[in-house]
Image (tube, rainbow, N blue to C red):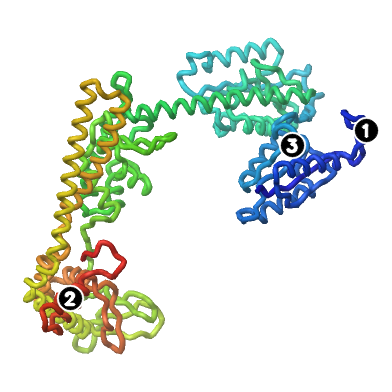
Amino acid sequence: MKNVITYSRSATDEKVINERTGLYIDPLEYQNESLNEYCSYFNYSVVEHFQEVYRGDTFNRPEWNKLKKLIIERQGKSNAIDSIIIIRPDRFCRNMILSFNELKELSNLGCEVECVEGYIYDNQIRRLNILNRLNEKNKINNMKNVIIYSRVSTDEQANQGYSIEYQEEVLTRHCNLNGYNIVAKFQCDKSGKDFNRPQWKKIKSLVQERRKKADSIDLIIILRPDRFARHLVLALLEIENLLKMGCEVEFLEGEKMDPSNPDSFLVQAIGFALPEIENRKISKRSKEGSHKARLNGCFTGTAPRGYKCVRVGKDATLEFSKDADLIREAFEKMASGLYTADEVRRWLNGQGMKLSKNQFPNIIRNLTYSGKILVRPFGNQPEQIVQGLHPALVSEELFAKANDVLNGRKRNMDFKSDKLNLYPLKGHLYCPTHRRTLSAYACTGRSNKYHYYLCTKPHVKCDRYPVEEVHNQIERILSNIQFSAQLMSSYRTTLEGLFESDDLNRKKSIQKSLDEIEKLNKRRLFVEEQYMDGELPAQEYQDLKNNINTRLFNEKNNLQQLQEVLSPFREYLDKQVPMLEDLVGFYKSVDGKTKNKILGCIFSEKLYFEEKKVATPKFTTPIELLLNASKVLQNCKNKKEVKNDLFSQFAPPLGLEPRTL
């Protein structure tokens, strides 16, 4: 059931004669009775009724403001107002532009306007009050000062009689015949969908500048309404703004405007509506044509960096431009994992290709570079990926790798290497009191230099920590990790058997993906044979081919990822654990920069001190697993207990799927 508000309005409180009965009636009572009958017939729930005696050329009415306030209060609630019921459109408003704006505002609030008699735009005749000519008595011989305006939006319009030269010639001849004084001529090559045009802004500036002067602009002469605008509401608003500045718009072709006749406003509105309807039809046909072309592998739109638009016969496609090698190298740098996206972007900028931070990721994600065409959803058709007619700038494998790195699925860890040999812990220590990273410095004593880590908070007294003592504490922590790694290596056979099933599942997934690829290839071959034998229509063949190609592309990408990922545990046991078996010896033998990298792999958070000692640190996941497994191996005697406890240590918490390392 609709929640509605009924609204009745009259310009006078005097009774009027009913044309059908010849009796005097109260206009508000007549509206109220009709509105109640209407709501009762359609079973509407009338929330409240508003009525007022007020003129209809504005919405600044007391009762109407109360009505809108009620709609806003209930917006988005279960008892929201669905409709406003009025008797006729003229009871709503007698100003078309204000009506359009008010209807749009109500629509945004989730409320519509419903008329008992007619539609909301019926009899919507606006009474124009044309402004008097300013300083007209001071003009010589009453000659009108005019501006000539001509516009085209595309080169093709020149072949349809819309050329700039043709328009200007006709307009100039018209002004000479009527004795107009041509103040200026403006030519424009922008779209008519709005008034955000440089030349039109100059016209308005000139009109405003001469306003209320003896040489003010009286008219803007235009060939026909579609050269003025292709948007009904914007055109009416622009004419309203010009009238306020004392300037009118005159069209050579079409119905002539008579400002003294309110009915002519309807003719003018139709003249502006027709170009907008034509523009919408053109837009619809363009989108349909672009969608069909993309389904056939053609490229429509602006060429991406590294390509330029060309035509092969009737087909629009792409070929490499001078920037192709730079884009290809950018993909290679991104896929290597050694560079961040911003580093690659800055490198491209250094080569003369200016890209913003938002533009570069869009290049890496653009399927066009892999030879594919992304077809957006259109109508009832879903989004599709088809093989393009243009050459691929990068291979599918390189495209997938670059996007994996960009999306964070695969990274090559790169540590900052700006630490000194003397202070390898610099950057790994912080002060919990002031939440600042500790720095380091050397203090000169009577006979020697003493090195400390200390807080960087100025003008406060904070503890400082001798470098040698801190380094000794860190080495003791590393010794504990080294012992755990040695213990874990002695149980290698047990651990390999425990987690062998993890690698087996990955192999099954790879084989399943290979089988699916083989099946899709067979289907594609079968469809091609059916088409070549004439047993399959062209459109059906094209749809099946695009569907198979899309699934095949996704399956190959999935297979590549499975093949690149090793068994997490086997990689852990083969690569990471052996490196930790002589962790302390290796740590002592390397320089400070390498030590800093080692510590970054071991500690997940910065270290801090409690009572002059390093507080219990938080380790990275591989080290945490190692220490937990070491505890299990030391405490469990029974083989079955070892396996069960190890599984609970290495497996993630419940709720994470799949349960892998």
Query: Which three-letter amino acid code belongs to the residue tagged 1?
Result: Leu
Q: What is the C-alpha distance between the residues marked 2 and 3?
A: 78 Å
* Relative to 137, 316 lies left or right: left
Count all numbered tags in the image, as a single digit. 3
Please name the residue that numbered disc 2 is placed on.
644
- Residue beneath the point at 28% across and 21% down: 312
* Most foreground residue, 57 or 543: 543
Query: Which three-letter amino acid code belongs to the residue tagged 3?
Result: Val
Please name the residue that numbered disc 1 is placed on.
23
Q: Secondary structure at mark 1?
A: loop
Residue 381 in view of the camera: yes
Residue 330 in the image: above or below residue 182: below
Q: Position of residue 296 (x, y in %)?
A: 31, 27
Residue 507 in the image: above or below residue 190: below
Residue 630 in the image: above or below residue 405: below
Q: Please tell me how crowded label 2 is: few (under 14), some (14-19), or many (20+) other residues with Cα within 10 Å.
A: few
Please name the residue that numbered disc 3 is placed on.
116
Q: What is the C-alpha distance between the residues marked 1 and 2?
A: 98 Å
Query: Which three-letter amino acid code belongs to the residue tagged 2?
Result: Asn
Q: Position of residue 484 (x, y in %)?
A: 13, 78
